[in-house]
Amino acid sequence: MDRPDLIPLQQSDRYAATLRLLGRRVTRHLVDDGAPVQAITRRFGPVSVSYLPRADLSGGRARVLSELPASTARLVIPEAPEVFEGGCWPILTPQHIAEINVPHSPVHDTLWANMHQKWRNRLRRALDGPLTLRESYFDLARHRTLLALEQAQRKRRGYRSYPPDFLAAWSRANPHHGLVLEAMHQDETVAFMLFLMHGPVATYVVGWTGPEGRRLHAHNRLMWEAMRSFFAKGLCRIDLGTVDTEDGAALARFKLGCGARVRTLGPTLLAPPGFRVSP
């Protein structure tokens, strides 16, 4: 990982606070050369599993696996693509994520130049159109109706995302660390995006658009405003989540079209109980 503080959402202290509010057991393991490694332990019947989502286990940091209870299986999605040897079983192929990092100055020109032409053309039409923007900190009571729209959308389209319970707990555990961007037309919300902020990183978690929002290219406008807003606030990275060119081709094209770069994570690995990392 290029900077110790540019950690993914799943390894942030705000993520841990949210899960603890939901009754999950989260442990943080200190290492000498960077951010702590975070593990979430749950029981499934007689089996305990410690889940290390997007953990940086490069080099000597892999010893964290040996510090977990010997009776616990480890499910790991490593942040780096290296595959551990000596007893870890790959059970899912590597994931790919899309990220936007702070561009070179001038920021506006670089962001604009990194976009694909079709994406940029849609943004131009959105900027010239009748949309207005509203930005507010995420608050469950205020934004419950928007989340309900997204829930109905994911049910229709059959995709999975962060569950409502998690978003509700985040709102309570981390006030002023979620940002909702809404596109408005004739005083109605036609699209929105929700980002969670943790340290110098903002992670996109859910979004919704209706027919009018699609017609006006509202999500292009929202993403553009998100990039400008977060980099003006001093954040260094926007994490747009996984890129799935098969089951989520349209969303993948949107993420890549805005200028995001793809990074490959490691495969999902299962380390059986009793696994030890060789010194």
Image: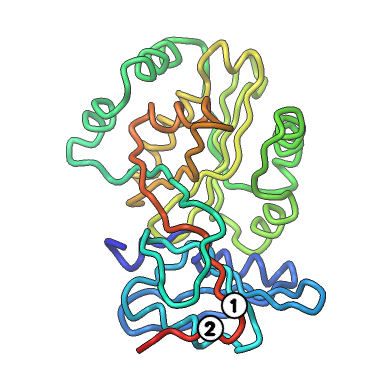
Q: Residues within 10 Å of mark 1 (few under 14, many from 20)?
A: some
Q: Quadrant of the C terminus?
A: bottom left
Q: In the rendered structure, which amino acid carries the disc numbered 2?
A: Phe
Is the residue 119 above or below the residue 92 in the image? Answer: above
Left or right side of 277 for 158: right
Position of residue 182 relative to residue 273, above or below, is: above
The N terminus is located in which quarter? bottom left
Judge left or right: residue 82 versus residue 273.
left
Residue 120 image point, x, y percent: 35, 18
Q: Residue at x 71, y 73 (%)?
A: 42
Can you tell which mark lies on residue 99? none
**Where is mark 2, residue-wise?**
275
Picture layout, residue 85 above or below residue 213: below
What residue does disc 1 label? 272
Are the residues at dot 1 and dot 2 in contact (C-beta closer than 8 Å)? yes
Q: Is residue 263 left or right of residue 186?
A: left
Residue 278 coordinates in the image, percent (x, y): 39, 86
- Residue at image position (65%, 49%) is 162
* Residue 209 lies in quadrant: top right
